[in-house]
Image (spheres, grey):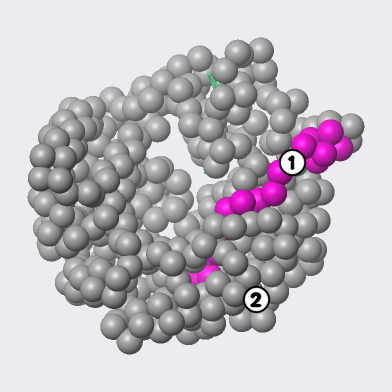
Amino acid sequence: MTDRTDTATINAHSGAPLWLLAELTYRCPLQCAYCSNPLDFASVRDELTTEEWLDLLAQAREMGAVQLGFSGGEPLVRQDLEQLVAEARRLGFYTNLITSAQGLDEARIAALREAGLDHIQISLQASDPDVAAAVAGSAKAHARKLAMARAVKAAGYPMVLNVVLHRHNIDQLDAIIALCDELGADAVELANCQLYGWAHLNRAGLLPSREQLEAAEATTGRWRIRLAERGRAMDLLFVVPDYYNDRPKACMGGWGSIFMTVAPDGAVLPCHSARLLPMTFPSVRDRSLREIWYDSEAFNRYRGDAWMQEPCRSCDERHRDVGGCRCQASLLTGDPDATDPVCSLSPNHHLIEAARREADGADGTVGALTPRNVHESRIFCRS
Ligand code: SF4
Ligand code: FES
């Protein structure tokens, strides 16, 4: 932890929170087993009101935030979404809706367009309707996603499709990219599952094997060539899972550096997973965003490098990756101050190697995954 002098020095050099992720609600009609929401989300009932969201949007913009993502849960569950989008637009944010498309229809797309929404990102679970239904816990969701992707495109939006990859859909990547192509996507995020929240709980059933991963990278490479030959502008972004890297990512560009999440109940977090950490995060109901960003212990705790343990403390790479991800370190080692075990220099790297070996030998079915729903979450709340 930083002492008072360190904190003052760090504060003087802390930039503005450029990115604000507004998690409007944890409510969601789907049950994706890879969700990064906290396991005990069912205990959060007291969502911020429309007025509270409007006030914090103004605060964030005044601090210099420019990018705004509306997320959840499913943000379309909130009937005030259009009102929040309109105000964000008036304040000068670039706005992005991150949605499963459940609750979307042509009328709502038109209303969001009228409110000034800049961008829509729809998630797809798979190309195969049965796999999609099993992962999302809904037989109807896949068809709605496809219909709404077409409607979003027809409304003139640039469209990003996001496909979370895991061991049950990664072998279908060829068909997944073909589907995205057919839907007219401008870009596709092929994001290997990040193992936080429900995804960490289901890790053994989600992490692909190295063989699957290598095949998927090769498929993506072939599609990039094919698309270029056709002159088709559809960017393919392939995100390798942390567990198959030897160096960690500079998570969120560094703790409290450019990114701020506000949870449905007003807790302000440096990343969307931070609620799993053994620490308390301040709420916009008690303090201003400015005070939280610059002066709270939570946001200052992992700024700079004074908090680092060895081997990070004396490592030449510490300013590039800032010691990796605090949430991952905490989940895997129980110590949020530890070097991220993804790093091959970490004394805990064997935990990552063991997970890779486990993935190579895994044979579970998609039905064995624990769904993210209120019933399961209440079990975690009780325990
Ligand atoms: Fe990064 Fe720490 Fe590994 Fe060095 S030891 S590469 S700073 S995680
Ligand atoms: Fe929380 Fe990386 S996801 S610090």
Q: Nearer the viewer, residue 141 or 365?
A: 141
Amino acid type of the residue that numbered disc 1 sits on in the rendered structure: Ser
Determine whether 52 is above or below 205 in the image: below
- Does the segment drawn in magenta span residue 15? yes
Residue that numbered label 1 is attached to: 14
Which residue is found at the position 37% from the left and 65% from the top? 120
Crowd band around label 1 with a 10 angstrom C-alpha radius: few (<14), some (14–19), many (20+): some
- Element type at marker 2? helix
Which residue is found at the position 53% from the left and 33% from the top? 250
Q: Quadrant of residue 22?
A: bottom right
Amino acid type of the residue that numbered disc 2 sits on in the rendered structure: Leu
Residue that numbered label 2 is attached to: 54
Which residue is found at the position 27% from the left and 63% from the top? 136
Q: Is residue 200 left or right of residue 156?
A: right
- Residue 335, which numbered label? none
Q: Position of residue 112 (x, y in %)?
A: 42, 78
Please say whether residue 50 is visible from this viewpoint: yes
- Does the segment drawn in magenta span residue 255? no
Please count the marks in the image. Answer: 2
